[in-house]
Image: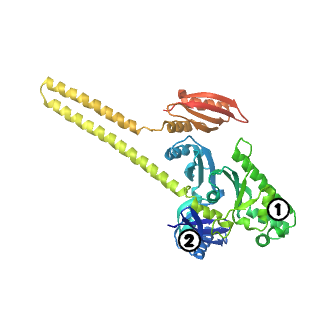
Amino acid sequence: MTRRTVAVDIGSRWVKVVVLAREGDQVRIARSAAQEIEDSSPAAKAQALARAMRAAGIRARKVVCAVGRTEAVIKRIHLPPADRETVSKLLEFEAQQHLPFPLEEMAWDFEVDEEGSVLLVAARKRAVEAAREVLAQAGLRAAAVSVSSAGAAAAYLHHAAPGTDETAVLIELGAGPVVVNVFRGRQWLLSRPLGIGGDGLTTAFALALGCGIEQARSVRDSQGLAALADGAAQLREWLQTLRAETERSLLAAAGPATAPTVQRIAATGGGWLTPGLADAVSEALGRPLEILETAGAPGPMFGAAAGLGLARGVNLLSSASAGGRRQTRRWVGSAIAVGALLAALALGTWRYCAVQQQLLARPTVAHREAEMQDLRVRQRVLTARRAEVERRLQPRHQVLSALQELSAAAPPGVWLTSVSFSPRRAIAVQGKAESATTVTSLLDALGRRVTLTYLRQGDGHVEFAITMQGS
């Protein structure tokens, strides 16, 4: 059985559409088309998208699309092993430290790999809505919204050998900023947009040739690097920056460890259609450059679009709706529990009044004593039931409650860097602060439940660790 997915990649200069056909493990591009965008307005993008859909003969109305890498944040975060729902709740606390905007302004989703590491993918909600608006103007609607680099990464991982542990670099080159992605085996370690891009390379052609941008773009597309004098200063500067930023990306991905040796350099994006560029970059990086190809793709510019059909794990739309469903379930559960408590109290009050009336109607002391004894028994049962309902209303995750309390008590100038815990033990928290006084303020706010483990001076800040008892 053949499954088909329509994927749309809206860049700053081109719109690419593909129909990805899957038959078992085999994946190919059944149809594809690309159209140039006349200007940066949503209407121009929608018109280019509609033309591309007609050119490819695609009639489907539901598509997978993406926001640009510069509109998104991609971070790898280490959290304690847990089920997906618990990880989602922990990320609501942890993600705010990694996102440049308030969490309520972001649409986000995540993936958990086999090692338990979490890949957080987020974008401004207004960027997601802008992408959906372009689709709507073209008569389409989004089945999923991802990030363009997630599509490029999925395209790379589709070609990566199973069980490999090689360190690889994937370079995305289009009209916008160059994006460097670092992989170790099948784990996506880092995605980093650079300060140079395809437009910057076109500018280098314009400066070297002494012409305008449009003429430089035409020369670049038709003649490539052969049109430049050997060793053109502008081209050398662009290549040197690419090499330096790639090495910085490897260092960032490795963390405190020494930068790993790269076994593979892959590339995707329409910028690699420039004749001679792949060879020049291979020479600058000291390793052959491999252009990713998907079966049926007319060129490297369709790599990210093809990958979007494969990268169904990250969906900024489904995350938002799932969060809404989880919130609705929480409200419904709370409403049911509160209703049960109120019903129990109402029933107890009714029984109390009924017994009182019966006591007043009975003349003998013995009867009244028996009824009072029955009332006390019923009152104990009612009290026990109410305590049980109240217990069910209490938060079950002590760690989340403690983290919420910690977040609320933290004064300005405190940053939490890691959290670890295990069942029935104290929660260990590490962080940084502007000064020791700030840490003291945090301890005072939390009271006796917190113990300071260590406090040491860092470079312009202090580092601290505390242990905190669950509520």
Q: Name the spot of residue 201 as percent of width and height, x first.
A: 77, 63
The answer to whether one can see residue 294 in this image is yes
Residue with the mark numbered 1: 235
- Contact (Cβ within 8 Å) of mark 1 with mark 2: no
Q: Earlier in the sequence, mark 1 or mark 2?
A: 2
How many residues crowd mark 2 within 10 Å: few (<14), some (14–19), many (20+)?
some
Q: Secondary structure at mark 1?
A: helix
Figure quadrant of residue 96: top right
Left or right of 168 on screen, residue 126:
left
Figure quadrant of residue 197: bottom right
As drawn, which residue projects farthest toward the right? 230
Q: Nearer the viewer, residue 222 or 209?
A: 222
The answer to whether one can see residue 130 in this image is no
Which residue type does callout 1 highlight? Leu
Which residue type does callout 2 highlight? Ala
As drawn, which residue projects farthest toward the left? 363
Q: Name the spot of residue 162 as percent of width and height, x first.
A: 62, 54
Residue with the mark numbered 2: 138
Q: Name the spot of residue 181 as percent of width and height, x first.
A: 68, 54
- Eye-nearest disc, 1 or 2: 1
Q: Nearer the viewer, residue 289 or 447?
A: 289
How many residues crowd mark 1 within 10 Å: few (<14), some (14–19), many (20+)?
many
Q: Name the spot of residue 293 as percent of width and height, x first.
A: 67, 65
Q: Residue at x 13, y 31 (%)?
A: 361
Q: Secondary structure at mark 2?
A: loop
The alpha-carbon separation of the residues under discs 1 and 2 comes to: 38 Å
Figure quadrant of residue 24: bottom right
Task: Using the image, determine if residue 415 lies above or below residue 375.
Answer: below
Q: State the mark number for residue 170.
A: none
Task: Using the image, determine if residue 228 lies above or below residue 284.
Answer: below
